[in-house]
Amino acid sequence: MFSHIMVGTNDLDRAKGFYDTVLGTLGVPPGRVDRHRVFYMTSTGIFSVSLPIDGEPATIGNGSTIGFACTSSDQADAWHAAGLASGGTACEDPPGVREGPTGKLYLAYLRDPDGNKLCGLYRMP
């Protein structure tokens, strides 16, 4: 359904360091810098971080969340810990199991250094 997702940053080097570390826990190679953007390419899609093209400050999307697929609850925990250690901040409840209409999910939420809300998600069997 999606070809790519891009979020804004006000500090490209800081964002690259954060996402290299966090996405590295999911097996994603370090990002490639292209002028004012960093691209993380996988077989399932592209995630990118960009300085705003219009020169205005990057801002967060209120109500927006970007979810990254994890293969286990341990991987989600490692993803969350790497995010906190790399300048992210915890948000929502602590990582753990949530039950809803789609079944059991293991969720770990944090905000990147620019305030974008992220989720490490493992769909439990």
Image (tube, rainbow, N blue to C red):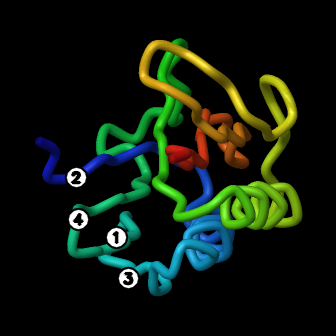
Displayed quadrant of residue 101 = top left
Which residue, given by chain and number where applicable, does mark 4 sit on?
44
Residue 33 is left or right of residue 93, and the answer is left
Nearest to N terminus: mark 1 or mark 2: 2
Per the rendering, the mark at residue 39 is 1
Task: Label 2: state its secondary structure.
Answer: strand
Per the rendering, the mark at residue 82 is none
Q: CA distance from mark 4 to mark 1?
A: 13 Å
Q: CA distance from mark 4 to mark 2?
A: 9 Å
- Mark 3 residue type: Arg
Which residue, given by chain and number where applicable, does mark 3 sit on?
32
Marks 4 & 2, CB-CB < 8 Å contact: no
Nearest to N terminus: mark 4 or mark 2: 2
Nearest to N terminus: mark 4 or mark 3: 3
Say if 29 sits above or below 69 in the image. Answer: below
Residue 52 is left or right of residue 113, and the answer is left
> Which is more foreground, mark 4 or mark 3?
4
